Image (spheres, grey):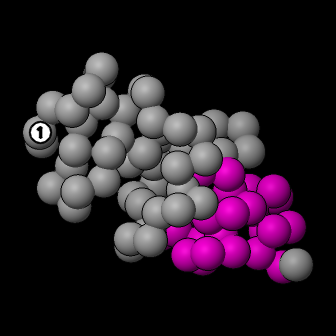
Amino acid sequence: MKKHRDENWIGPDGIESGPNVSENWYLSYDGPAPIVEDIYGENYGVDRGDGAVPIEFYIKKWGIPDGFGKTDFEQKIANK
Protein backbone atom coordinates (compact mmCIF):
# COMPACT_ATOMS: atom_id res chain seq x y z
CA MET A 1 0.00 0.00 0.00
CA LYS A 2 1.15 3.48 -0.81
CA LYS A 3 0.90 6.11 1.94
CA HIS A 4 -1.19 9.11 0.93
CA ARG A 5 -1.98 12.30 2.80
CA ASP A 6 -2.74 12.40 6.51
CA GLU A 7 -3.27 8.83 7.69
CA ASN A 8 -4.91 7.65 4.46
CA TRP A 9 -3.41 5.23 1.97
CA ILE A 10 -3.96 4.14 -1.60
CA GLY A 11 -4.71 0.45 -1.91
CA PRO A 12 -3.69 -1.82 -4.79
CA ASP A 13 -6.98 -1.02 -6.57
CA GLY A 14 -6.21 2.72 -6.49
CA ILE A 15 -8.92 3.52 -3.94
CA GLU A 16 -8.07 5.93 -1.15
CA SER A 17 -8.79 4.45 2.26
CA GLY A 18 -8.31 5.52 5.84
CA PRO A 19 -9.77 7.61 8.63
CA ASN A 20 -9.78 10.88 6.67
CA VAL A 21 -11.84 9.64 3.71
CA SER A 22 -15.27 11.21 3.26
CA GLU A 23 -18.06 9.32 5.06
CA ASN A 24 -20.02 9.00 1.80
CA TRP A 25 -17.09 7.74 -0.31
CA TYR A 26 -19.15 4.74 -1.42
CA LEU A 27 -21.57 6.96 -3.41
CA SER A 28 -18.91 7.59 -6.06
CA TYR A 29 -17.11 4.24 -5.69
CA ASP A 30 -17.45 2.19 -8.87
CA GLY A 31 -15.34 -0.83 -8.03
CA PRO A 32 -16.19 -4.36 -6.99
CA ALA A 33 -18.07 -5.02 -3.77
CA PRO A 34 -15.89 -4.12 -0.79
CA ILE A 35 -15.04 -7.07 1.45
CA VAL A 36 -17.27 -7.03 4.53
CA GLU A 37 -15.46 -7.72 7.76
CA ASP A 38 -18.18 -7.15 10.38
CA ILE A 39 -21.43 -5.37 11.20
CA TYR A 40 -21.43 -2.13 13.20
CA GLY A 41 -24.98 -0.98 13.92
CA GLU A 42 -26.58 -0.33 10.55
CA ASN A 43 -23.25 -0.39 8.66
CA TYR A 44 -21.04 -3.07 7.24
CA GLY A 45 -17.42 -2.68 8.27
CA VAL A 46 -15.50 -2.93 4.99
CA ASP A 47 -11.92 -3.05 3.80
CA ARG A 48 -11.79 0.30 1.99
CA GLY A 49 -12.90 3.93 2.07
CA ASP A 50 -13.57 5.09 5.61
CA GLY A 51 -14.33 1.49 6.56
CA ALA A 52 -18.12 1.65 6.56
CA VAL A 53 -21.00 1.32 4.13
CA PRO A 54 -24.65 1.47 5.21
CA ILE A 55 -26.08 -2.05 5.05
CA GLU A 56 -29.10 -0.90 3.06
CA PHE A 57 -26.91 0.75 0.39
CA TYR A 58 -24.55 -2.24 0.21
CA ILE A 59 -27.31 -4.83 -0.23
CA LYS A 60 -29.12 -2.79 -2.88
CA LYS A 61 -25.90 -2.24 -4.88
CA TRP A 62 -23.96 -5.51 -4.39
CA GLY A 63 -26.33 -7.94 -2.68
CA ILE A 64 -25.80 -9.75 0.59
CA PRO A 65 -22.11 -10.44 1.16
CA ASP A 66 -20.86 -14.00 1.72
CA GLY A 67 -21.18 -15.06 5.34
CA PHE A 68 -23.68 -12.33 6.19
CA GLY A 69 -27.43 -11.77 5.78
CA LYS A 70 -28.56 -13.52 8.93
CA THR A 71 -29.72 -10.52 10.97
CA ASP A 72 -33.34 -9.38 10.98
CA PHE A 73 -32.21 -5.96 9.71
CA GLU A 74 -30.40 -7.47 6.72
CA GLN A 75 -33.32 -9.77 5.91
CA LYS A 76 -35.80 -6.87 6.06
CA ILE A 77 -33.71 -4.91 3.54
CA ALA A 78 -33.16 -7.92 1.27
CA ASN A 79 -36.89 -8.62 1.16
CA LYS A 80 -37.95 -5.08 0.20
Circle 1 Cα neighbour tier, 10 Å, few/some/many (<14 / 14–19 / ≥20) = few
Q: Is residue 45 left or right of residue 63?
A: left
Residue type, mark 1 in image: Lys
**Viewer-nearest residue: 42 or 53:** 53
**Which of the 4 quarters of the picture holds residue 59?**
bottom right
Residue 57 percent coordinates (x, y): 69, 63
Specify the segment rendered in magenta. 53-79
Q: Secondary structure at mark 1?
A: strand
Quadrant the N terminus occupies: top left
- For the point 15% across and 56% down, the residue is 12
Asked whether residue 69 is drawn in magenta, I would say yes
Residue 33 at least partly seen:
yes
Examine the rendered structure and indicate whether residue 64 appears above or below residue 42. below
**Viewer-nearest residue: 1 or 73:** 1
Q: Is residue 16 left or right of residue 62?
A: left
Q: Is residue 40 left or right of residue 12?
A: right
Asked whether residue 6 is drawn in magenta, I would say no
Examine the rendered structure and indicate whether residue 25 appears above or below residue 63. above
Residue identified by numbered label 1? 2
- For the point 36% across and 33% down, the residue is 18
